[in-house]
């Protein structure tokens, strides 16, 4: 077999692996919550399409830190939940949504934001468009860590991630610190996590 054929096979294997890892983080694109009537187009970033990963060995992820009990409760309701993979997906979501907000990409935001968060961000974009203000650009995601987690009586899981990022507006830069809470109904087959709340310290 020629070296060029081997390189093509290796690239194909890497592409399959990357697509599989994307799916296991925040889930596939199943659309917005019921009742939302906005016309939404697919996001510009790649969407996971592979089936959920199985765990044939029954390996249990380690739960540590202040959110340990909440993470364990979520894993009990959904054994496929893994904090490390969730955090990797949350970082990707932060970068994607920060860019969509800066670009005024309402279609992408509508897919991954809960109704109240979308309305707040939509109003901020509209005000920015009205005043021709420059949008903040994500320069670097400096830090991310799970800050809290819980599973309520209805089976809704919520995980709060603390993000530190460097933002730029024109020639100015600043450090932003925010707490993003993602939620998912573990009683459904929908694997999507929606951004449910954004708060500052």
Image (cartoon, helix red, strand yellow):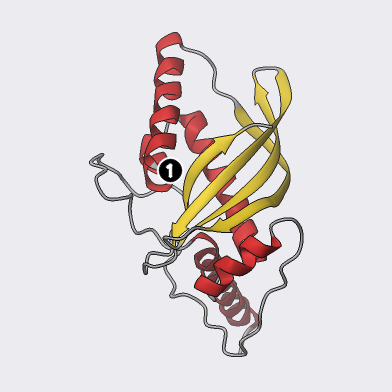
**Residue 80 makes an appearance in the image:** no
Q: Position of residue 200 (x, y in %)?
A: 64, 31
Which quadrant of the structure image shows residue 94?
top right
Q: Identify the residue shown where x is 36% and y is 67%.
A: 188
Q: Position of residue 161 (x, y in %)?
A: 64, 48
Check the image and name the residue furthest to the top.
131
- Using residue 16 as the reference point, say whether residue 141 is left or right of it: right
Q: Residues within 10 Å of mark 1 (few under 14, many from 20)?
A: many
Q: Position of residue 198 (x, y in %)?
A: 55, 37
Q: Is residue 193 above or below residue 71?
A: above
- Using residue 65 as the reference point, say whether residue 45 is left or right of it: left
Q: Is residue 149 above or below residue 119?
A: below
Q: Identify the residue shown where x is 67% and y is 64%.
A: 69
The foreground one among 129 and 18 is: 129
Q: Identify the residue shown where x is 57% and y is 75%.
A: 8
Q: Identify the residue shown where x is 69% and y is 32%.
A: 201
The foreground one among 33 and 94 is: 33
Q: Quadrant of the N terminus?
A: bottom right
Q: Is residue 149 above or below residue 162?
A: below
**Residue 189 makes an appearance in the image:** yes
The number of callouts visible is 1
Q: Position of residue 41 (x, y in %)?
A: 31, 46
Q: Secondary structure at mark 1?
A: loop
Instruction: Give the labeled residue for mark 1.
Output: 113
- Using residue 108 as the reference point, say whether residue 67 is left or right of it: right
- Using residue 84 as the reference point, say whether residue 42 is left or right of it: left
């Amino acid at each position: 077999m020629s070296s060029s054929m081997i390189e093509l096979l290796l690239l194909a294997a890497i592409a399959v692996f990357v697509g599989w890892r994307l799916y296991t983080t925040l889930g596939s694109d199943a659309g917005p919550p019921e009742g939302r009537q906005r016309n939404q187009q697919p996001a510009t970033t790649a969407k996971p399409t592979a089936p959920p990963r199985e765990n044939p060995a029954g390996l249990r992820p380690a739960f540590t830190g202040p959110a340990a009990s909440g993470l364990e409760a979520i894993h009990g309701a959904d054994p496929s939940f893994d904090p490390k993979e969730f955090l990797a997906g949350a970082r990707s979501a932060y970068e994607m949504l920060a860019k969509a907000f800066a670009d005024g990409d309402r279609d992408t935001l509508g897919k991954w934001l809960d109704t109240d968060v979308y309305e707040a961000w939509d109003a901020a974009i509209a005000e920015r468009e009205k005043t021709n203000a420059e949008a903040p650009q994500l320069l670097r995601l400096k830090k991310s860590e799970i800050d809290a987690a819980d599973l309520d009586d209805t089976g809704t899981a919520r995980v709060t991630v603390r993000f530190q990022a460097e933002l730029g507006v024109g020639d100015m830069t600043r450090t932003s610190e925010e707490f993003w809470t993602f939620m998912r109904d573990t009683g459904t087959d929908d694997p999507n996590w929606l951004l449910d709340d954004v708060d500052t310290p």
